[in-house]
C-alpha cells in the first residue's frame, strides 16, 4: 500500500467522521460546557468505539477479498450506495435542531462514568460496523492483504479519527452557536405556524365564554 492510498483513506475517514452527528455534537457540547477534562473522557470513548469497529471491519474485508475476489466490485458498489445514503441522512438531520443539555444535566462526574456514557451513548453496533466496512472496502484488494497494509490503514484511521475530534473540540463555540441560532429559528417558526393556525383565537374565545 502506498502513502497516497493511505492518505486517501484518511481523507475519507476524516470527511465521514466530521459530518455532524449526535455523538460529535454531544462531544462538542461537553467541551464547551464542561471543559477539556470532561470532553477527554467522551472523546476517548468515541475513539475506542471507532477503532474497535475498524478492526472488525478490516479483518472482515480482508477475509472477503481473499475468499471472494470476484465480489469486490459488487461490495464496493454497495458500499458507495451506503455511504451516500448515510451522508444524505446526516445532511438532512442538520435541518433539525439539536437540543443541548444544560450544564448541570450532563451525565457523569468522574472520568470512568463519562467514559462509560460515551461508550453506550448513540451506540448502534450494526451501523458502526457497516460504516467502517463501507469505508475500508475501497482500499483493500486481494494483492494487498498484508500486515503492512493493515498497519497503514490503522494509522490512517486513527489519525483521521483524532483529527475530527480535535476539530470539534477547537471549534466547539462556533459549532454550538450555530446550533443555538438554528434552534431559535425553528422555535420562532413553530410559534408563527401556531399563530397563523387560529388556535390562539379559539383559545381566547373559549376562555371568554367560560368567564
Image: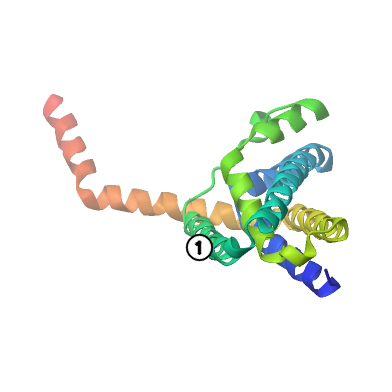
Residue 5 x/y as whole percent = 78, 71
Q: Which residue is most to the left?
A: 209
For residue 163, above or below residue 118:
below
- Give left or right: position of 130 versus 56: left
Q: How is the image coloured?
A: rainbow
Residue 18 visible to the viewer: no
For residue 139, above or below residue 93:
below
For residue 21, above or below residue 13:
above
Nearer to us in this view, 60 or 182: 60
Residue 29 x/y as whole percent = 68, 45
Nearer to us in this view, 176 or 48: 48
Within-10-Å neighbours for mark 1: few <14, some 14–19, many 20+: few
Q: In this figure, which residue is indicated by the disc labeled 1?
A: 81
Label 1: element kind: helix
Residue at coordinates 82% horizontally, 30% vertically from top-left? Answer: 111
Residue 57 visible to the viewer: yes
Residue 106 x/y as whole percent = 67, 32
Q: Residue 87 sits in which quadrant? A: bottom right
Q: Residue 115 sits in which quadrant? A: top right
Residue at coordinates 88% horizontally, 60% vertically from top-left? Answer: 148
Amino acid at each position: 500500500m502506498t502513502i497516497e492510498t493511505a492518505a486517501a483513506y484518511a481523507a475519507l475517514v476524516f470527511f465521514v467522521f466530521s459530518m455532524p452527528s449526535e455523538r460529535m455534537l454531544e462531544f462538542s457540547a461537553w467541551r464547551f460546557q464542561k471543559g477539556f477534562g470532561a470532553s477527554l473522557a467522551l472523546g476517548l470513548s468515541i475513539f475506542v468505539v471507532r477503532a474497535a469497529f475498524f478492526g472488525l471491519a478490516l479483518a472482515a474485508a480482508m477475509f472477503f477479498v481473499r475468499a471472494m475476489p470476484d465480489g469486490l466490485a459488487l461490495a464496493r458498489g454497495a458500499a458507495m450506495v451506503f455511504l451516500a445514503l448515510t451522508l444524505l441522512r446526516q445532511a438532512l438531520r442538520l435541518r433539525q435542531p439539536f437540543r443541548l443539555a444544560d450544564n448541570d444535566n450532563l451525565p457523569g462526574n468522574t472520568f470512568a462514568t463519562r467514559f462509560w456514557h460515551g461508550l453506550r451513548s448513540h451506540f448502534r453496533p450494526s451501523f458502526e460496523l457497516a460504516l467502517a466496512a463501507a469505508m475500508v472496502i475501497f482500499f483493500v484488494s486481494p494483492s494487498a492483504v498484508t500486515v503492512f497494509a493493515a498497519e497503514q490503514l490503522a494509522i490512517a484511521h486513527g489519525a483521521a479519527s483524532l483529527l475530527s475530534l480535535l476539530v470539534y473540540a477547537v471549534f466547539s463555540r462556533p459549532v454550538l452557536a450555530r446550533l443555538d441560532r438554528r434552534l431559535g429559528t425553528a422555535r420562532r417558526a413553530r410559534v408563527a405556524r401556531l399563530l397563523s393556525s387560529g388556535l390562539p383565537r379559539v383559545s381566547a374565545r373559549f376562555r371568554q365564554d367560560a368567564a
